[in-house]
Amino acid sequence: MMQWLRNLFAWTWRVLTTPAATLSLAFLTLGGFVGGVMFWGAFNTALELTNTEEFCVSCHEMKTNVYEEMTRTIHFSNRSGVRASCPDCHVPHEWTDKIARKMQASKEVWGKIFGTINTRQKFLDERLRLAQHEWARLKANDSLECRNCHSSVAMDLSKQTERAAEIHTRYLLNGKATCIDCHKGIAHELPNMQGIDPGWKVPEELEGKELPTASPVDELRDAIHRAHSGLLADGGI
Protein backbone atom coordinates (compact mmCIF):
# COMPACT_ATOMS: atom_id res chain seq x y z
CA MET A 1 0.00 0.00 0.00
CA MET A 2 2.77 2.40 0.96
CA GLN A 3 4.60 1.62 -2.25
CA TRP A 4 1.45 2.40 -4.27
CA LEU A 5 1.06 5.76 -2.52
CA ARG A 6 4.71 6.60 -3.14
CA ASN A 7 4.32 5.74 -6.82
CA LEU A 8 1.19 7.90 -7.06
CA PHE A 9 2.94 10.82 -5.38
CA ALA A 10 5.95 10.43 -7.67
CA TRP A 11 3.74 10.38 -10.76
CA THR A 12 1.83 13.46 -9.59
CA TRP A 13 5.07 15.31 -8.92
CA ARG A 14 6.42 14.45 -12.36
CA VAL A 15 3.22 15.75 -13.98
CA LEU A 16 3.36 18.98 -12.00
CA THR A 17 7.04 19.57 -12.77
CA THR A 18 6.81 18.71 -16.47
CA PRO A 19 7.38 21.71 -18.79
CA ALA A 20 4.25 23.69 -19.70
CA ALA A 21 4.18 22.52 -23.32
CA THR A 22 3.42 18.95 -22.23
CA LEU A 23 1.03 20.02 -19.47
CA SER A 24 -1.47 21.76 -21.75
CA LEU A 25 -3.74 18.78 -22.32
CA ALA A 26 -3.94 17.82 -18.66
CA PHE A 27 -4.58 21.37 -17.51
CA LEU A 28 -7.07 22.03 -20.29
CA THR A 29 -8.99 18.89 -19.32
CA LEU A 30 -8.98 19.75 -15.63
CA GLY A 31 -9.67 23.42 -16.29
CA GLY A 32 -12.48 22.56 -18.67
CA PHE A 33 -14.07 20.27 -16.09
CA VAL A 34 -13.84 22.84 -13.29
CA GLY A 35 -15.05 25.61 -15.61
CA GLY A 36 -17.95 23.44 -16.76
CA VAL A 37 -19.03 22.73 -13.19
CA MET A 38 -18.87 26.43 -12.31
CA PHE A 39 -20.79 27.42 -15.43
CA TRP A 40 -23.45 24.78 -14.82
CA GLY A 41 -23.88 25.88 -11.23
CA ALA A 42 -24.09 29.56 -12.19
CA PHE A 43 -26.51 28.80 -15.02
CA ASN A 44 -28.87 26.80 -12.83
CA THR A 45 -28.68 29.40 -10.07
CA ALA A 46 -29.62 32.16 -12.51
CA LEU A 47 -32.36 29.96 -13.97
CA GLU A 48 -33.93 29.39 -10.58
CA LEU A 49 -33.64 33.05 -9.61
CA THR A 50 -35.62 34.00 -12.71
CA ASN A 51 -38.15 31.28 -11.92
CA THR A 52 -39.58 32.83 -8.77
CA GLU A 53 -42.66 34.90 -8.13
CA GLU A 54 -40.48 37.65 -6.66
CA PHE A 55 -38.63 37.95 -9.96
CA CYS A 56 -41.85 37.95 -11.99
CA VAL A 57 -43.51 40.72 -10.01
CA SER A 58 -40.36 42.83 -9.86
CA CYS A 59 -41.67 44.36 -13.08
CA HIS A 60 -44.49 46.75 -12.27
CA GLU A 61 -46.25 45.67 -15.48
CA MET A 62 -46.86 42.30 -13.85
CA LYS A 63 -47.28 43.40 -10.25
CA THR A 64 -49.97 46.00 -10.87
CA ASN A 65 -51.90 44.01 -13.46
CA VAL A 66 -52.03 40.23 -13.60
CA TYR A 67 -50.48 39.59 -10.16
CA GLU A 68 -52.95 41.88 -8.43
CA GLU A 69 -55.77 40.05 -10.19
CA MET A 70 -54.42 36.65 -9.14
CA THR A 71 -54.52 37.64 -5.46
CA ARG A 72 -58.31 37.65 -5.74
CA THR A 73 -58.55 34.07 -7.06
CA ILE A 74 -58.62 30.59 -5.54
CA HIS A 75 -55.13 29.91 -6.85
CA PHE A 76 -53.83 32.53 -4.41
CA SER A 77 -55.97 31.92 -1.33
CA ASN A 78 -58.04 28.84 -0.59
CA ARG A 79 -59.11 26.43 2.15
CA SER A 80 -56.15 24.08 1.56
CA GLY A 81 -53.50 26.79 1.91
CA VAL A 82 -51.77 25.68 -1.30
CA ARG A 83 -50.78 28.71 -3.37
CA ALA A 84 -49.83 28.64 -7.03
CA SER A 85 -47.12 31.13 -8.00
CA CYS A 86 -46.39 32.66 -11.41
CA PRO A 87 -43.89 29.97 -12.55
CA ASP A 88 -46.23 27.20 -11.42
CA CYS A 89 -48.70 28.24 -14.13
CA HIS A 90 -46.38 29.65 -16.77
CA VAL A 91 -43.23 27.49 -16.63
CA PRO A 92 -43.08 23.68 -16.98
CA HIS A 93 -41.27 21.77 -14.24
CA GLU A 94 -39.32 19.34 -16.44
CA TRP A 95 -35.86 20.75 -17.17
CA THR A 96 -35.89 20.49 -20.97
CA ASP A 97 -39.39 21.99 -21.21
CA LYS A 98 -38.37 24.69 -18.75
CA ILE A 99 -35.36 25.70 -20.87
CA ALA A 100 -37.51 25.83 -24.00
CA ARG A 101 -40.05 28.02 -22.21
CA LYS A 102 -37.33 30.35 -20.90
CA MET A 103 -35.94 30.77 -24.41
CA GLN A 104 -39.43 31.48 -25.70
CA ALA A 105 -40.06 34.02 -22.95
CA SER A 106 -36.78 35.86 -23.49
CA LYS A 107 -38.48 38.14 -26.00
CA GLU A 108 -40.49 39.56 -23.11
CA VAL A 109 -37.31 41.43 -22.20
CA TRP A 110 -37.78 43.46 -25.38
CA GLY A 111 -41.32 44.29 -24.30
CA LYS A 112 -39.95 45.57 -21.00
CA ILE A 113 -37.23 47.63 -22.67
CA PHE A 114 -39.57 49.26 -25.16
CA GLY A 115 -42.46 49.76 -22.71
CA THR A 116 -45.04 47.68 -24.57
CA ILE A 117 -47.40 47.49 -21.57
CA ASN A 118 -45.79 49.90 -19.10
CA THR A 119 -49.10 51.64 -18.34
CA ARG A 120 -52.49 50.26 -17.34
CA GLN A 121 -54.11 51.47 -20.55
CA LYS A 122 -51.41 49.93 -22.71
CA PHE A 123 -51.89 46.66 -20.88
CA LEU A 124 -55.65 46.72 -21.41
CA ASP A 125 -55.17 47.56 -25.09
CA GLU A 126 -52.85 44.57 -25.51
CA ARG A 127 -54.70 42.23 -23.16
CA LEU A 128 -56.65 40.25 -25.75
CA ARG A 129 -53.59 39.68 -27.94
CA LEU A 130 -51.50 38.59 -24.95
CA ALA A 131 -54.26 36.30 -23.69
CA GLN A 132 -54.75 34.69 -27.10
CA HIS A 133 -51.02 34.07 -27.36
CA GLU A 134 -50.96 32.32 -23.99
CA TRP A 135 -54.11 30.31 -24.75
CA ALA A 136 -52.58 29.12 -28.02
CA ARG A 137 -49.32 28.19 -26.28
CA LEU A 138 -51.10 26.14 -23.62
CA LYS A 139 -53.34 24.55 -26.22
CA ALA A 140 -50.27 23.50 -28.22
CA ASN A 141 -48.50 21.90 -25.24
CA ASP A 142 -51.66 20.22 -23.87
CA SER A 143 -51.80 22.57 -20.88
CA LEU A 144 -48.43 21.35 -19.65
CA GLU A 145 -48.12 23.98 -16.92
CA CYS A 146 -51.60 23.17 -15.58
CA ARG A 147 -50.42 19.59 -15.20
CA ASN A 148 -47.62 20.76 -12.92
CA CYS A 149 -50.26 20.42 -10.21
CA HIS A 150 -53.38 18.94 -11.83
CA SER A 151 -53.23 15.36 -13.09
CA SER A 152 -56.20 13.80 -14.82
CA VAL A 153 -54.97 10.40 -13.62
CA ALA A 154 -55.21 11.57 -10.01
CA MET A 155 -58.66 13.13 -10.39
CA ASP A 156 -61.32 11.70 -8.07
CA LEU A 157 -64.39 12.34 -10.17
CA SER A 158 -66.65 11.24 -7.33
CA LYS A 159 -65.59 14.35 -5.38
CA GLN A 160 -66.31 16.70 -8.27
CA THR A 161 -69.67 18.25 -9.01
CA GLU A 162 -71.81 16.24 -11.36
CA ARG A 163 -71.35 18.81 -14.09
CA ALA A 164 -67.53 18.90 -13.76
CA ALA A 165 -67.26 15.11 -13.65
CA GLU A 166 -69.45 14.81 -16.76
CA ILE A 167 -67.37 17.31 -18.74
CA HIS A 168 -64.02 15.90 -17.62
CA THR A 169 -65.10 12.37 -18.48
CA ARG A 170 -66.53 13.35 -21.85
CA TYR A 171 -63.71 15.64 -23.01
CA LEU A 172 -60.59 15.72 -20.82
CA LEU A 173 -59.91 12.08 -20.03
CA ASN A 174 -60.11 10.97 -23.64
CA GLY A 175 -58.00 13.84 -24.95
CA LYS A 176 -60.72 15.65 -26.89
CA ALA A 177 -60.01 18.82 -24.93
CA THR A 178 -57.31 20.21 -22.69
CA CYS A 179 -57.46 22.36 -19.54
CA ILE A 180 -57.14 25.74 -21.26
CA ASP A 181 -60.10 25.01 -23.53
CA CYS A 182 -62.45 25.56 -20.60
CA HIS A 183 -60.43 27.35 -17.92
CA LYS A 184 -59.33 30.54 -19.67
CA GLY A 185 -60.09 32.94 -16.82
CA ILE A 186 -59.00 30.75 -13.94
CA ALA A 187 -56.31 33.03 -12.46
CA HIS A 188 -56.64 36.38 -14.24
CA GLU A 189 -59.45 38.55 -15.47
CA LEU A 190 -60.59 37.87 -19.01
CA PRO A 191 -60.24 40.42 -21.79
CA ASN A 192 -63.27 41.52 -23.76
CA MET A 193 -64.53 38.14 -25.00
CA GLN A 194 -66.96 39.49 -27.58
CA GLY A 195 -66.56 37.34 -30.66
CA ILE A 196 -64.06 35.02 -28.92
CA ASP A 197 -64.70 31.31 -28.55
CA PRO A 198 -65.07 30.87 -24.76
CA GLY A 199 -64.02 27.24 -24.81
CA TRP A 200 -66.33 24.44 -23.78
CA LYS A 201 -69.77 24.50 -25.30
CA VAL A 202 -72.86 22.38 -24.89
CA PRO A 203 -72.53 19.42 -27.30
CA GLU A 204 -75.08 19.37 -30.11
CA GLU A 205 -76.62 16.17 -28.79
CA LEU A 206 -77.31 17.89 -25.46
CA GLU A 207 -78.66 21.13 -26.89
CA GLY A 208 -81.94 22.01 -25.23
CA LYS A 209 -81.47 19.49 -22.42
CA GLU A 210 -80.97 20.44 -18.81
CA LEU A 211 -77.38 19.75 -17.77
CA PRO A 212 -76.35 18.75 -14.25
CA THR A 213 -75.97 21.91 -12.22
CA ALA A 214 -72.66 22.70 -10.58
CA SER A 215 -73.96 23.57 -7.12
CA PRO A 216 -77.00 24.76 -5.13
CA VAL A 217 -75.85 28.28 -5.88
CA ASP A 218 -76.28 27.59 -9.59
CA GLU A 219 -79.73 26.15 -8.93
CA LEU A 220 -80.68 29.32 -7.06
CA ARG A 221 -79.28 31.48 -9.87
CA ASP A 222 -81.29 29.51 -12.43
CA ALA A 223 -84.44 29.83 -10.33
CA ILE A 224 -83.98 33.60 -10.09
CA HIS A 225 -83.35 33.78 -13.83
CA ARG A 226 -86.54 31.82 -14.55
CA ALA A 227 -88.50 34.04 -12.17
CA HIS A 228 -87.21 37.20 -13.83
CA SER A 229 -87.92 35.77 -17.27
CA GLY A 230 -91.48 35.03 -16.19
CA LEU A 231 -91.97 38.56 -14.91
CA LEU A 232 -90.65 40.03 -18.15
CA ALA A 233 -92.95 37.79 -20.19
CA ASP A 234 -95.95 38.90 -18.10
CA GLY A 235 -94.96 42.56 -18.39
CA GLY A 236 -94.41 42.79 -14.65
CA ILE A 237 -91.13 44.70 -15.02
Image (cartoon, rainbow, N blue to C red):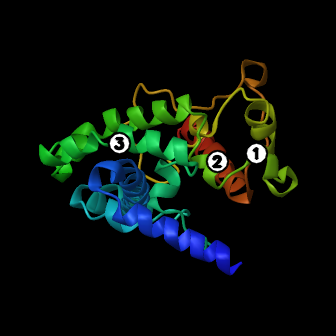
Q: Residues within 10 Å of mark 1 (few under 14, many from 20)?
A: few
Residue at the left extreme of this rendering? 114
Disc 2 to disc 1, how far (Cα)?
A: 8 Å
98 or 203, which lies in front?
98
Res. 228 mark: none
Q: How many marks?
A: 3
Which of the two discs, 2 and 3, labels the residue nearer the N terminus? 3
Could you tell me which secondary element the residue under label 3 belongs to? Answer: helix
Residue at the right extreme of this rendering? 158
Name which residue lies at 37% across and 37% down.
104
Mark 2 or 3: in front is 3
162 or 42, which lies in front?
42
Res. 105 mark: 3
The residue where tag 2 is placed is: 147
The residue where tag 1 is placed is: 152
Q: Are marks 2 and 3 in contact (CB under 8 Å)?
A: no
Q: Position of residue 49 (x, y in %)?
A: 37, 64
The amino acid type of the residue labelled 1 equals: Ser
Picture layout, residue 92 above or below residue 4: above
